[in-house]
Image: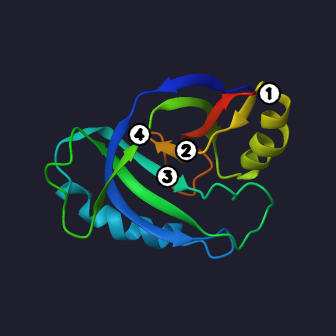
Amino acid sequence: MNPTITKLEEKKLIGKHLTMSLANNRTGELWRSLMPRRKEIGNTVGSDFYSMQVFGPAYFEQFDPTAEFEKWATVEVTDFDEIPEGMEGFTLPGGLYAVFPHKGTDTSIFQYIYATWLPNSEYSLDDRPHFEVLGEKYKNNDPDSEEEIWIPIRPRA
């Protein structure tokens, strides 16, 4: 499976975030805290949701399921003029991304991306947020669910 290589323009996002690890996955808790309040976010761009991970610079040096990262549940907005109480704005920097379409609930695609595709590509992982675009075909924990996985990359030096 080959991704589409896309240059992303900077995006403004509003939402909520939690610190978690793969071993202590709090993704459900995070989304349950945002979804009842999503209509409070004005000036949204489209109807997609962004599930974003912000990893530290050494996160991928050695696999550790207890290593913590910041996970965000967000929507895109035109500006940060009105941020609902208890939410925050995040500016997603632009740059080059490998975009993988994904259908279903099998998470082994991440193993493929990081262990097979990336080492055999002409790209290196870049130190920017990773995210998934959850569009109209996204259905949580459903085998027919569809989403896009965006991995930040840069040309190999």
Q: Nearer the N terminus, badge 3 or badge 2?
A: 3
Residue drawn at 60 percent across, 38 percent down = 152
Cα–Cα span, label 3 and label 1: 23 Å
Residue 128 is marked as 2
Q: Nearer the N terminus, badge 2 or badge 4?
A: 2
| Disc number lying in front (4 or 1) | 1
Cα–Cα span, label 2 and label 4: 25 Å
Judging by the rendered image, the residue that carries numbered circle 3 is 52
Quarter assignment of residue 94: top left
Q: Nearer the N terminus, badge 3 or badge 1?
A: 3
Task: Judge whether 152 appears above or below 33 on screen.
Answer: above
The amino acid at mark 4 is: Glu
Cα–Cα span, label 4 and label 1: 30 Å
The amino acid at mark 1 is: Ser
Q: Nearer the N terminus, badge 2 or badge 1?
A: 1
Cα–Cα span, label 3 and label 4: 17 Å
Residue drawn at 67 percent across, 68 percent down = 22
Cα–Cα span, label 2 and label 1: 18 Å
| Disc number lying in front (3 or 2) | 2
Judging by the rendered image, the residue that carries numbered circle 1 is 121
| Disc number lying in front (2 or 1) | 2
For label 4, the crowd category at 10 Å Cα-Cα, with few meaning under 14, some 14 to 19 and many 20 or more, is few
Residue drawn at 46 percent across, 73 percent down = 29
From the viewer's side, name the closer residue of 118 and 58. 58
> Is disc 2 placed on a helix, strand or loop?
loop
Judging by the rendered image, the residue that carries numbered circle 4 is 136
